[in-house]
Image (cartoon, helix red, strand yellow):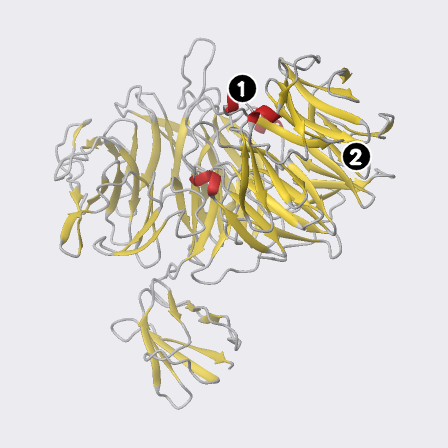
């Protein structure tokens, strides 16, 4: 579970730490930890809650260690965390009401609430500990977990007549157990044996908070400190009993915590530390490079530890807050994902949405050399939102264009936005929409052709296809797409045709000069569909189409404009694929809503779906090779938004509704001739290695033979694209002896030969 990532001790800026190269068939996650929500001290660790996972900072060795579904947790999507110093348990509550208990890096799952038939709200809002029990504050009341037996020991329903009542927080004060609800406090004798009987509980009916929404509260010495919602603000109230509450702080409150026998109050842009008698000890605002944008804060071992809104976790010496440090795992800027763009040794992430009302900051993340980096902030980013596609200049890898669904096309050089193209600086090649006072420029997709011209779609226009020629001039083309939202563009590698589509059940094709037509996805199909979701061209120059009812394929598009009338229906046919499973024959993935398709180096198709996870099918689609879902893999969701495959490593990046993960596939992209150097990894192969050995750099689909030093063949296989895999065993399944093994490869004609060596240690 523990993975050493980096020492994230920066006097300025945010850590973008590195990972080691992952093995073939292995997973890793790429969750964003720029926004964190809660910090939990645990002796020499500080646990930090992100949206989809958490990490802990090790105070002794200054390392960061992730705890996610990929690292062994049961789920993704965290609602809250809490740590019990007495038992050493970390409790992790998920948004789906699942619960993990972690101690000594062992994970114990309690799915009782998630699986229960309790009606209504089952969410877990906060967690408290007492006497070897965890008290879960839930939408239906309080669930008590016996930590020794790791089971639900009791349920308290605190509503009138024992009905469910949402509990936001719970605490123990003097001899009472007190629950905070949306309608005041509910309390009982803490040592009463039968608290599952509602008559033992009393509802506050006299204090100033008797009808108030109390979201959080703490107790210290003889005081109760309550966070109370009033209209759109949060306020702090204090009392020495449950009757006489006085408003203490009249401002927005993000959290209140008690640690080191002090009260830490987190507000919008400041953290205040009070003594137990409410005396203000310090106010900590902006420090050095960091704006104090805190969600939560605690004191521990002379430091103030802060869950930050855009800096991961930051911390500073409490008695001398003149410098601030940042700690977070390497992560993309957002968990949101709309489209990947694979590049040499890297992967760009366009995080935007086409909903039109999302307004996600126009940040782009780049994963390269095992690190995540982002665009440099400037004023251009303040006016652009929802990046939906990216295209890189083939002649300059530091020069790219990005489509904004709100404000045109961004030109980026060296990680900085240098231009924003709209109707004002493209000679009206790009046009705005007229929605009363709201006039967005809807640019949804981008591609570059073989002549280095950059093509874009400008949605809801009759001239929705736009080009920026290599000389810098802009031109648009008639497409007859009217008010349709055009959000996908692909340029084929055979005829340089531009293929694009949107919300109508049509695929448009344009030659980039003066011919255009549309393809009917149901022409030639045995299964009628009503929506096109994605397109991908494979290595055989076939175009694969994802619909709401499975896959279709265009096998030949040479006659795209044979009908001869611009804007008419093309004679191109879209064909179903018959797939057999035992005695059952049906159309490929006919019961799945296909959201994305990516083609790997072996011409196999990775297919994402709206509800069924990810499928890997053979080159022609007639064989299912893999199926990953949230139940049989680290996928955090079965809703897949986008898939991108890194060509050099074969790593498959999968964007889901709950963030990004990646899987190291067996296929890499290959050239027509082998690379100058064929290499294997790991090499040498250590004695305790039981994984898959990758050997890459071959010509496409090479025939590979592995021999011992005497020339005896111990294993033969065929490369997937440019990579072959070997488990270090003979064809009979026996692990080979220690020594040097030779790899010989060639294409099917015996040409394009290559040789490598692998050292095996046993």
Q: Which mark is residue 287?
A: 2
Residue 393 place in picture, x, y as percent: 46, 43
Bin the neighbour count of mark 2 within 10 Å (Cα to Cα): few under 14, some 14-19, many 20 and up.
Answer: some
Residue drawn at x 27%, y 39% as measured from the top left: 497
- Up-down: is 407 above or below 196? above
Q: Nearer the viewer, residue 466 or 488?
A: 488
Residue 711 place in picture, x, y as percent: 37, 88
Q: Nearer the viewer, residue 635 or 744?
A: 635
Residue 488 place in picture, x, y as percent: 34, 34
Bin the neighbour count of mark 1 within 10 Å (Cα to Cα): few under 14, some 14-19, many 20 and up.
Answer: few
Q: Residue furthest bottom?
A: 710
Q: Nearer the viewer, residue 649 or 581?
A: 581
Q: Is residue 312 among what the camera can see?
A: yes
Q: In this view, does 433 lie to the left or right of 212?
A: left
- Up-down: is 623 above or below 455? below
What residue is pinned by disc 1? 160
């Amino acid at each position: 579970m523990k993975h050493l990532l980096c020492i994230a001790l920066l006097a300025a800026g945010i850590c973008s730490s590195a990972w080691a190269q992952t093995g073939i068939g292995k997973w890793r996650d790429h969750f964003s930890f720029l926004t964190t929500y809660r910090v939990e001290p645990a002796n020499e660790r500080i646990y930090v809650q992100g949206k989809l996972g958490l990490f802990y900072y090790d105070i002794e060795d200054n390392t960061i260690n992730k705890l996610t579904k990929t690292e062994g947790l049961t789920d993704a999507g965290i609602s809250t965390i809490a740590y019990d110093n007495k038992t050493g348990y970390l409790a992790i509550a998920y948004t789906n009401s699942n619960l993990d208990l972690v101690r000594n890096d062992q994970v114990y799952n309690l799915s009782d609430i998630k699986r229960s038939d309790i009606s209504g709200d089952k969410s877990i809002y906060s967690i408290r500990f007492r006497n070897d029990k965890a008290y879960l504050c839930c939408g239906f009341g309080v669930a008590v977990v016996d930590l020794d037996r790791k089971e639900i020991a009791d349920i308290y329903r605190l509503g009138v007549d024992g009905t469910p009542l949402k509990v936001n927080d719970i605490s123990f004060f003097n001899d009472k157990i007190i629950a905070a609800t949306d309608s005041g406090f509910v309390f009982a004798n803490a040592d009463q044996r039968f608290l599952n009987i509602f008559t033992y509980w009393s509802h506050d009916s006299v204090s100033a908070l008797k009808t108030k929404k109390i979201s959080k509260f703490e107790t210290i010495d003889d005081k109760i400190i309550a966070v109370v919602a009033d209209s759109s603000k949060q306020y702090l109230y204090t009392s020495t009993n449950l009757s006489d509450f006085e408003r203490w702080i009249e401002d927005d409150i993000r959290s209140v915590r008690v640690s080191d026998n002090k009260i830490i109050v987190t507000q919008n842009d400041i953290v205040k530390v009070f003594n137990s008698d409410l005396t203000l000890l310090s106010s900590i605002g902006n420090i050095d490079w960091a704006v104090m944008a805190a969600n939560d804060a605690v004191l521990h071992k002379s430091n103030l530890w802060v869950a930050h809104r855009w800096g991961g976790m930051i911390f500073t010496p409490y008695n001398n807050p003149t410098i601030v440090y940042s700690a977070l795992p390497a992560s993309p800027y957002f968990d949101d994902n709309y489209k990947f763009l694979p590049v040499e040794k890297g992967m760009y992430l366009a995080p935007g949405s086409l909903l039109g009302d999302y307004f996600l900051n126009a940040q782009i993340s780049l994963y390269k050399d095992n690190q995540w980096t982002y665009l440099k902030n400037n004023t251009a980013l303040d006016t652009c939102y929802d990046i939906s596609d990216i295209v890189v200049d083939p002649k300059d890898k530091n020069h790219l264009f990005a489509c904004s669904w709100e404000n045109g096309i961004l030109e980026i050089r060296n990680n900085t936005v240098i231009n924003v193209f709209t109707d004002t600086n493209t000679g009206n090649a790009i046009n705005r929409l007229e929605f009363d006072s709201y006039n967005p420029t809807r640019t949804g997709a981008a591609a570059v052709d073989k002549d280095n011209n950059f093509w874009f779609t400008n949605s809801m226009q009759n001239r929705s296809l736009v080009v920026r020629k290599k000389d810098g001039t802009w031109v648009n083309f008639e497409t007859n797409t009217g008010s349709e939202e055009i959000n996908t563009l692909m340029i084929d590698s055979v005829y340089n045709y531009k293929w694009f589509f949107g919300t109508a059940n049509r695929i448009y094709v344009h030659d980039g000069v003066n011919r255009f037509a549309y393809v009917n996805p149901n022409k030639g199909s045995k299964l009628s569909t009503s929506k096109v979701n994605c397109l991908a061209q494979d290595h055989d120059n076939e175009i694969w189409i994802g619909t709401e009812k499975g896959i279709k394929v265009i096998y030949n598009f040479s006659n795209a404009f044979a009908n001869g009338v611009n804007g008419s229906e093309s004679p191109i046919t879209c064909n179903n694929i018959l797939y057999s499973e035992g005695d059952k024959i049906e159309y490929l993935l006919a019961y799945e809503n296909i959201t994305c398709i990516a083609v790997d180096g072996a011409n196999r198709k990775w297919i994402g779906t709206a509800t069924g996870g990810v499928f890997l099918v053979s080159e022609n689609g007639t064989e299912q090779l893999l199926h990953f879902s949230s139940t049989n893999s680290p996928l955090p969701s079965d809703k897949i938004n986008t898939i991108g495959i890194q060509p050099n490593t074969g790593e498959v990046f999968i964007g889901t509704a709950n963030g990004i993960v990646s899987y190291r596939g067996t296929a890499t992209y290959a050239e027509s001739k082998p690379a100058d150097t064929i290499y294997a990894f790991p090499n040498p192969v250590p004695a305790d290695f039981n994984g898959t050995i990758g050997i890459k750099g071959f010509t496409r689909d090479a025939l590979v033979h592995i021999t011992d030093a005497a020339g005896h063949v111990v294993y033969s296989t065929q490369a997937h694209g440019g990579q072959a895999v070997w488990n270090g065993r003979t064809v009979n399944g026996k692990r080979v002896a220690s020594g040097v093994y030779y790899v010989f490869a060639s294409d099917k004609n015996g040409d394009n030969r290559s040789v490598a060596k692998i050292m095996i240690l046993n």
